[in-house]
Amino acid sequence: MASHDQGSSSITHKSFSRPDDEMDYDHGQAAAISLRGEPVWRSELTPGWSWDEDIKPYADGLEACPMTHREYVVGGRIRYQMTDGNEIEASAGDLLFIPPGHRAWVVGDQPCILLDW
């Protein structure tokens, strides 16, 4: 059996009920906790949330998100569109890697809940 030395034998425990950072959107909110210096975001995006409406106005004129996301969809549905036109819809249980150059919007009438790291 291989040994996995992580440099510490302490377990880190945090909760989204006491986030390290928060963001509010017109159509939802996000909270972040930091685990050993790495943020993990939990977003609850309500119907009507979109990158164009809720993020783009604050993105210094960018037409698409410049960030990379690793996401797990906890609930609801969301659609991503890359600048090349490629689209994908994700729903509860899906795991995604999303490169820079995308837009997104909530699909349907249920909130979309995401974990993003």
Image: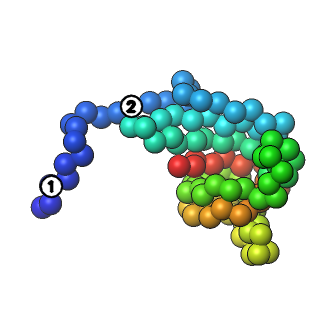
Q: Residue at x 68, y 56 (%)?
A: 66
User: Considering only vertical position in the picture, is 24 above or below 1?
Assistant: above
Regarding residue 93, the answer to whether it shows in the image is no
Could you tell me the amino acid type at mark 1? Ser
In this view, the residue farthest toward the front is 60
Q: Secondary structure at mark 1?
A: loop
Corner quadrant of residue 72: bottom right
Which badge, 1 or 2, is on the more N-terminal residue? 1
Q: Position of residue 10 (x, y in %)?
A: 25, 33
- Percent position of residue 4, x then y: 20, 53
> Which of the 4 image quarters holds residue 17?
top right
In the picture, residue 25 is in which quadrant? top right
Residue 65 x/y as whole percent: 72, 56
Q: Which mark is residue 13?
A: 2
Q: To which residue does mark 1 refer? A: 3
Name which residue type carries label 2: His
